[in-house]
Amino acid sequence: MKGQTEMKIIKIKKEAWGQGLEKLQSEFRLFGPVADKDGFEFKELAQGQLPVMDLGNTRLSAKSTVYPQTQVMFNYTLDESKEDHHIMKEVDLNGQPQAVIGLRPCDAASFQLVKRNFDNPEYPDPFWVRPYEQSTFVGLACDNPSPTCFCTSVGGGPYSENGLDVLLSREGEVILAKVITEKGEALAKAAGWDTDADENVFDERRDAAEKKITAKINSDQLKGKNANDLFSAPIWEDIAFACLNCGTCTYSCPTCWCFDIQDEVKGTEGKRMRNWDSCMYPLFTLEGSGHNPRPVKEMRVRQRFMHKLKYYPDKYDSDVQCVGCGRCIDLCPVNIDIRDVCETMNNYKPLKSES
Amino acid sequence: MLTYAEKIRELSAQLLREDKVDMVIGFRKGSLPMSNEPCMVKNPGDADKLVWDSNCGVNLASYLTDRKERIGIIAKGCDSRNINTHIIENKIKREQLTIIGVPCTGMIDKRKVSNSVDFDIIEVIEEADKVIVKGAGSEQTFDKKEVLRKNCEVCIHPNPVVYDEMVAEKVDINQDVDRYADVREVEEMDSDDRWQYFEDLLSNCIRCYACRNACPLCYCPTCFVDESQPQWLGKSTNATDTRGFHFLRAYHCAGRCTDCGSCETVCPMGINMRAFTKKLEKDCLENFEWQAGLNTEQRPPLDSFNPSDPDAFVK
Ligand code: SF4
Ligand code: SF4
Ligand code: SF4
Ligand code: SF4
């Protein structure tokens, strides 16, 4: 893999952790989980602020560190006395490098899945690609997976290194850091973390953590199924009945990437921005003519699950568009559970037809 | 509680078997502790799936909007009041409905329970008025009244106000509860503190609109926040737009809100947006002696016109 380095494990003591992060702040913008009311979320760390490392996963995913809910893309002025009036000016995307500290392996893997969308050779999206390239991902392994974590059945794991530059594993006050890429090495150096650890406990801890995962999905039969059969299967009315079309599942999902572009003008100054959008909303597909190709919620619910579990794997010849973080299961107010829906789809057999 | 579920299954199967309804709307067991999923049952044989416990906080009246079938619906106190409101507002016809009333003993606040234990919850069991929360190797027991939703703590209409069948005897009502202590607290703040209070209240709102979508009153074919030609409200995480959404939604619910708590139950961020609707509910009670949905004869105060209104401006 590009930028891969010879595997190295570093020991970071409590004081060195805080001091190292503080040092990093002169070079990097740091993001990490911080308390927010009764939960905790990824936010930019203030000077000297430590990321929360002893709770489970954040309520919302880490996608916002690269792809915030609202992101300004262009600025412009309508003031005709200015020379560049009515010209869109791209925001400066060459900001300070950033590091995301304490994201879980599922969130790290999610960047690899959405990369296929934002960083495709035909239309690379600079507003995602630049922040992504400027990020160093310092993951935190999960020794206590939650009951709804199912990363191991979608190609990940509580100690997966996919998408990470450094993987951390905690034991009491001591943190062990496995340096995975050159980027990670540069970060460790900048932080002054350089004490070699005497033993490699990662494999051992990985095995123990993986054993604790109880949730899973089965998607093995989905590849072989015909998309049209699934699309027209008589399963969606029942699956979608309870859905409120609230979009919580998509907003909290690390692998959902859809957005809506909006202009806002105040006085003569305008900005063009993008905001997260969701296939669960009627407005998502409403056309200028007033026609809506997905007028009812059943169609919207079907879109979400078909996209994640069928269209995406078919299009990219890959596993599902889900990293098993379990957020949509935990947060869905009416308990629509992707594990159950996947099971229904996976087991679906169309009635025999003549053709 | 078990007997409630048994009775619900029995009545539902019977309604379906006798072809009195095309479907029954109720809850089926969820895949997570403290979660049930609203569902519809069309075959008498499937009535067994229906459950009832203290995790049925979502207001089922939301699922009735504009349906054309003959429907059996399970209704606790607040659901029944929203069914009345739906009938008044022509969102469903009384003749279409067979209402299976459930005298409610209050619904659990899932978030309160999760925040009160320091382990991952694997199972939650209800026994009489106790709630037993289990994790891997840990267990904690609560009195149900400690973990009720805030609206249920002060509910004075737990018994359905309209029904065709009842699954049990009506429950006793605690009439001396102080319903509006929280609203008064906000009313008594000076304007700076109050501003700060609402700013904090909404600071982590992600504008997913789950609160609106779960609300049985929010059935507009196009909600004002979704108006796009022209656009009424910005779409970003701008704080003014977020407030705009909450204030306007609350006013749209004034005189119609039953304080069923569905909005708060479904919010992924744990926001207490009932602070808005509850204030308006209190004002309606104080100014118009009005509580929403108690019958179908009277229209809500803000959508009716009375020629003898004492205020000159409406004439
Ligand atoms: S979170 Fe649940 S109710 Fe909301 S849109 Fe997703 S599936 Fe539907
Ligand atoms: S679909 Fe659900 S479990 Fe999968 S990545 Fe998205 S939020 Fe996580
Ligand atoms: S608000 Fe009242 S009627 Fe509704 S669930 Fe709670 S106790 Fe029951
Ligand atoms: S449900 Fe919660 S987060 Fe979503 S719009 Fe309502 S208050 Fe905001």
Image: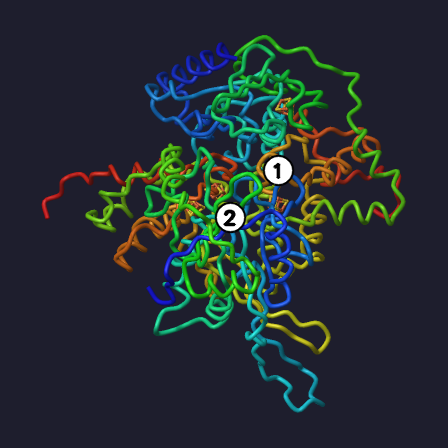
Residue drawn 70% across the image and 14% down it:
B173
In depth, the one of B112 and B308 nearer the eye is B112
Q: What is the residue that sits farthest to the left in this orientation? A: A354
The answer to whether marks 2 and 1 mark residues whose Cβ atoms lie closer than 8 Å is: no
In depth, the one of B221 and B206 nearer the eye is B206
Image coordinates of residue A89 in percent, x first then y, are 58, 81
Dot 2 amino acid type: Ser
Image coordinates of residue A39 in percent, x first then y, are 61, 41
Residue drawn 57% across the image and 65% down it:
A71
Q: Is mark 2 within 8 Å of ligand 2?
A: yes
Q: Which residue is mark 1?
A: B263
The part of the image, by quadrant, that contains residue A124 is bottom left
Above or below residue A27? Residue B293 is above
Above or below residue B134? Residue A27 is below
Image-based side of B91 in relation to A223, left or right:
right
Q: Which residue is mark 2?
A: A252
Q: Is mark 1 within 8 Å of ligand 4?
A: yes
Gap in angstroms between the C-alphas marked 2 and 1: 18 Å
Dot 1 amino acid type: Cys
Image coordinates of residue A50 in percent, x first then y, are 64, 50
Mark 2 lies on a secondary structure that is: helix
